Amino acid sequence: HLSLSPTIKELRRSDFPSGFQFGVATAAYQIEGAAYEGGRGLSIWDVFSHIQGSISDGSNGDVACNHYHLYKDDVLMMKSLGIKVYRFSISWSRIFPDDSEQLNFEGVSFYNNLIDCLLDAGIEPFITLYHWDLPLWLENDVNVRGWLTKGIVEHFARYAGSCFKLFGDKVKNWATFNEIRTMAVEGYGNGSKAPGRCSISALENSKKTTGDSSTEPYIVAHNALLAHGAAVQVYRKFFQADQKGRIGMVVDGKWFEPFSVTRQDEDAAQRCIEFEIAWILDPLFGMDYPDSMRKGAANRLPKFTDEELAILHGSIDFIGYNYYTAYYAEHIEYDIEPSQRWHETDRMANTHYANSEGNLIGECMGPPDNDWIYNCPWALPKMLEWLRQRYGKQQLSSIPIFITENGTMDDMEDMPRHVACNDLKRIEYLKATLQNLGACIKEHGYNVQGYFIWSLMDNFEWNSGLRSRFGLYYVDFANKQSRYIKRSAEWYREFLLQNDEKN
Ligand code: BGP
């Protein structure tokens, strides 16, 4: 019952509106390395990645792609691709390494140099302020406790304000956060990402017993939303008029397809979408948390004051949406002790595999013979339509969407370089996603203005380490982090440059 991609034979730059921006995306901890250089302070990821058992291949981001030292080459690589915009994140602990909150000028210079280099190459910087690498001093501060208290809000606003002041004359695109949902659910629900807090005995990694996973993901997301609101207030009050940039947020959320055409499964799919993307976006559009969450998580979900909601309402100039994949959703009745509940069980719906395998994480719904993890390019238009239905065509006509991440990985330890570089399936996936995107913009007029491939190069893929390769370029981590072009990079370059010449 799945609708397949529209059949467009060739993908052309002209299938997209002129002015549509194509780029690539990365994040600081995943590529920079130089973890102990340039005056950088530690972040929660430095600690987490060094705890035995937390990263599946035992790697960490100490060196990663060594982008800190190789950034000039990386910018040349981007220039050769023909991209016009580059999304990357700033490492907060490179800017404010310790609790004195004194600027680390070496860190500031690194980003200034990178930004200058990008601008020289004709590439616009698109900066994410927070891509999960919280300074350790904020995690350890007993009054702040990372994202667990509202104490974090003023620190984030101060950090954001410093970035606007330091870089805002040259940077016009700001995203406050990357995927608040992921950091809340995986950092505090199942504990698979830093700071690795988890109290759910039903989960495989139940050895982690810190934290209260029935409440913490909600508290963390709530405080991050408030921090977003505070940062946007700073930008709008002190910087936006002069700097003339835009500020928004990057969210994620899978598409959920009802497993059967029944009212119950349709409700389950809707509930799953609400528990992911609407959790974060609804408050930004002047609504409270979705009703399904207020019912499902009941008194464990924090409440906004009217004043807080007013700050969040209208606090984005754009939506950054990271699209990867789709899952089935099937209604399942759970009978779970409130103390054992967490985000996944609260939404009371999962895939049809949930019970039989005792596994609360869903199964991707792509073709079964496909060995790639992300393979549902057709669901992106469904999500765009869902967003339009929920937030209104008129409202979204003034709040553009950027697809801030889209990509796929090969996941194999010791994959030979020649195999990894001959990545025809990645091309297939990216091309199919772009075909779907281009066609639905053309046919339905969705206000999507840009698309970023995750990722420029293979990098430190969080809990799965260096073995999961997402890059357009191969990185030889055992040999000076040398970069090698993959077929997908050649394809992207051809698409962007040839068509550019034609236009
Ligand atoms: C996003 C993150 C990226 C990157 C990507 C990979 O959630 O923003 O930093 O890690 O995911 O995909 P996934 O985490 O789905 O494997």
Image (tube, rainbow, N blue to C red):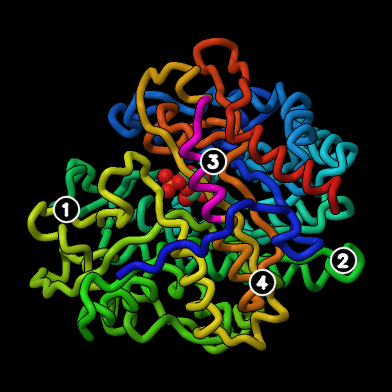
Q: Amino acid at mark 4?
A: Lys
Q: Residue 439's spot in the image, x, y percent?
A: 60, 67
Q: Which mark is residue 244?
A: 2
Q: Residue 39's spot in the image, x, y percent?
A: 68, 28
Q: Residues within 10 Å of mark 1 (few under 14, many from 20)?
A: some
Q: Amino acid at mark 2?
A: Lys
Residue bearing the label numbered 3: 427
Q: Which mark is residue 442?
A: 4
Quadrant of image for the N terminus: bottom left
Could you say which is closer to the camera, residue 305 or residue 456?
456
Between disc 2 and disc 4, whose residue precedes? 2
Could you say which is closer to the camera, residue 168 or residue 197?
168
Closer mark to the observer between disc 2 and disc 3: 3
Residue bearing the label numbered 1: 359
Find the distance from the CA under tag 2 to the CA under tag 1.
48 Å
Report the side of 146 relative to 448 (left or right).
left
Which span of residues is magenta-colored? 422-433
